[in-house]
Image (cartoon, helix red, strand yellow):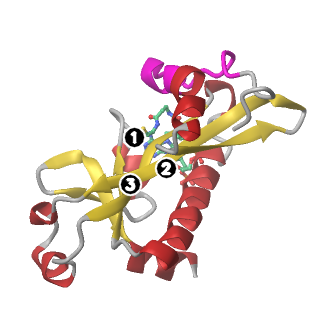
Amino acid sequence: MDKSKHDRRRFDCGVPALNSYLRVMASQQAVKDNSRTFVIEDPQREEWIIGYYSLTMIPVDLGVLPEKLQKKHQSARSGGLIARLAVDRRYTGNGYGEWLLIDSLHKLLQASESVGFPVVVVDAKEGAADFYRKFGFQSFADTPNKLFMTIADIRASLG
Ligand SMILES: CC(C)(COP(=O)(O)OP(=O)(O)OC[C@H]1O[C@@H](n2cnc3c(N)ncnc32)[C@H](O)[C@@H]1OP(=O)(O)O)[C@@H](O)C(=O)NCCC(=O)NCCS
């Protein structure tokens, strides 16, 4: 995301918190190295943002993973986090959400080759958990809107 190029005020995904994160926080958080935000531009007008996602890391409570995974990853403490992912309402239903999700998983898989973490986590907004389930994410036992996918499964599905 490029603050000087992109019209962040125009972006409207219908969720105020996700709109204001892009407008106010995304660029500041990147300058501070707290998270990274990536956008898809409208090819007709490159300053218009079709959709975005933000990535960072999160502590992972292994206790809420399935038992088999708890044993396998007992020394791990962190996961990659898709902190936010949204598509502007004017562009939904055209595969951009899927493109953003797959692109974010490619980036996290690549990061995991260097720093090593076993899962990717996402906090789905109301109504969006099924979007992530479609692509292989499963809910944590205690929080249906918080989902994870293992790096092993991401590697297998992205090839
Ligand atoms: C959820 C969101 C990212 C989907 O974006 P999109 O560009 O419309 O998604 P796509 O067109 O790539 O859809 C890919 C598939 O997911 C499905 N899908 C889209 N939104 C869905 C939802 N909320 N629940 C379940 N499935 C969904 C589509 O039907 C499509 O399925 P198909 O391939 O079988 O046709 C977008 O609607 C959005 O930004 N919503 C508001 C913010 C939000 O809830 N973000 C999510 C996480 S915090």
Q: Quadrant of the N terminus?
A: top right
Q: Nearer the viewer, residue 22 or 130?
A: 22
Q: Identify which amino acid the numbered label 3 is placed on.
A: Met
Above or below 59: residue 124:
above
Type of amino acid under label 2: Leu
Q: What residue is disc 2 on?
A: 55
Q: Is mark 1 within 8 Å of ligand 1?
A: yes
Residue at the image point whose x is 77% and y is 38% from the top: 41
Please provide the residue range marked out in magenta: 8-21
Q: Give the percent coordinates (x, y) of residue 136.
A: 40, 65
| 137 or 55: nearer the viewer | 55
Label 3 Cα crowd, 10 Å radius (few <14 / some 14-19 / many 20+): some
Which amino acid type is shown beneath numbered disc 1?
Ala
Label 2 neighbourhood size at 10 Å, few (<14), some (14-19), many (20+)? Answer: many
The residue under label 3 is 57
Q: In the displayed structure, does residue 95 sit left or right of residue 128?
A: right
